[in-house]
Amino acid sequence: MAYDVARERVVRFDAQGIWEWDGARWSSRNDAVGPSPRTFSAAAYDLARCSMVMFSGLDPSSTAVDTWEWDGASWAWRNVSPQPPARWDHAMAYDTARRRTVVFGGCTATAGLLADTWEWDGTTWRSLIAAGPIARHAHALAYDLARQRTVLFGGEDSSRVLLGDTWEWDGASWTQRLTATNPSARHGSEMAYDALRQRIVMYGGGGNGVAATDTWELDGTDWILRTPAPIPAHVWSTRSPSISPAAASCCSAAPRCSTPGNGTAPIGRESISSRTRHRGPTSDGVRSPAAVRGVVRRRAGRRPLGGDLGVERCRLDAADATGRCTGARRPRDGVRWQSRRSPALRRRG
């Protein structure tokens, strides 16, 4: 899921196709030509080129290894070589200052977990050979505009050990951030950048049969635990590991977080390769785009891997790498979560 700054829409793609959230309702935007239906893919919005970049993921028959871009009207397949190996449960973020989409880690069907870093500049994929985080999946990635660093937190390693480390990528090397306070180890958390308050916000995740419902903020120096009320709700689901042994080594039948379906679109359940993930957005958050012409907090869509973090959005000038917001009114600024339900849309098919 990614936020389309130019069109003021949250964009989400999975086995049901592509959907967009405009602040009031979800709408299907399925194109005649586009990616195969899939789950466990990753996406980021390319601010310079005004398109959402999506790479790889797990489709019903295999692991997709393709790069697609959505400009709000149609999909474009970027048939390039080289490109990263096929994977799922990886993470992506867009580096605004360097105008690169960053990909790290994930699962493969043949090699288990990955610890590689790749960047996409809109034309070419480039592999960055750099020591850094160990191989993992289900980690979180977000770009800190103020400090011009891509921040990584948590995930799960090949032994199914939960990770609670914080790393930063500056475009040349990874640096581990050893903070005085640290969130508990977890996989499946969600992160986004609050441009107005210049903080990384992280919500949810879990592991070992326990769902995390805590909210954390990284101010560039330390993690800060926030205690808002109310908080988004969670339920647990499990995944059956009837996949290849190599894939099962990193994506086994560990419990996963998901949010209970509410009958709204996109349709609330999908099944890929006998692994059931519950989807269907519970959107929280926010004032509509018309109400706030600056940064707003939007929680939209559902990711079963633990908590739907609201997507922080800002009307950024595409040429402005500082992350400054123009004409912004201060919204619910890190004080509380708000529940926002969209009108039910008719079930497709």
Image: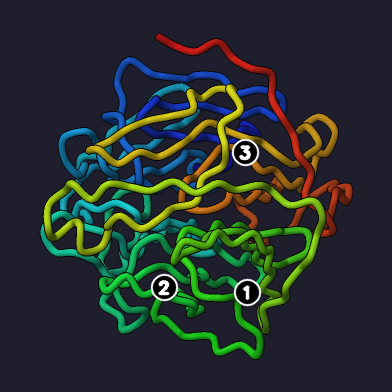
At horizontal 20% and vertical 63% (from top left) the residue drawn is 249
Q: State left or right for residue 222 relative to residue 142.
A: right
Identify whether 291 is placed above or below 247: above
Rate crowding at label 3 as few (under 14), some (14 to 19) or many (20 or more) other CA atoms within 10 Å: many
Q: State left or right for residue 325 relative to residue 161.
A: right
Q: State left or right for residue 233 relative to residue 38.
A: right
> Looking at the picture, which amino acid does disc 2 mark?
Leu
Q: Position of residue 89 (x, y in %)?
A: 34, 54
> Is residue 325 visible to us here?
yes
For marks 2 and 1, the one nearer the N-term is 1
Do the numbered discs 1 and 3 sit on residues whose CB atoms are within 8 Å? no
Identify whether 104 is placed above or below 260: below
> Looking at the picture, which amino acid does disc 3 mark?
Ala
Closer-to-camera residue (79/216): 216
Rate crowding at label 1 as few (under 14), some (14 to 19) or many (20 or more) other CA atoms within 10 Å: some
Question: Gap in Å between the C-alphas at discs 2 and 3?
Answer: 26 Å
Q: Which residue is mark 1?
A: 147
Question: Gap in Å between the C-alphas at discs 1 and 3?
Answer: 26 Å
Residue 162 marker:
2
For marks 1 and 3, the one nearer the N-term is 1
Q: Position of residue 60 (x, y in %)?
A: 22, 33
Q: Which residue is mark 3?
A: 300
At horizontal 51% and vertical 45% (from top left) the residue drawn is 258
Q: Position of residue 88 (x, y in %)?
A: 29, 51
> Looking at the picture, which amino acid does disc 1 mark?
Arg
Do the numbered discs 2 and 3 sit on residues whose CB atoms are within 8 Å? no
At horizontal 39% and vertical 34% (from top left) the residue drawn is 14
Q: Position of residue 223 (x, y in %)?
A: 67, 78
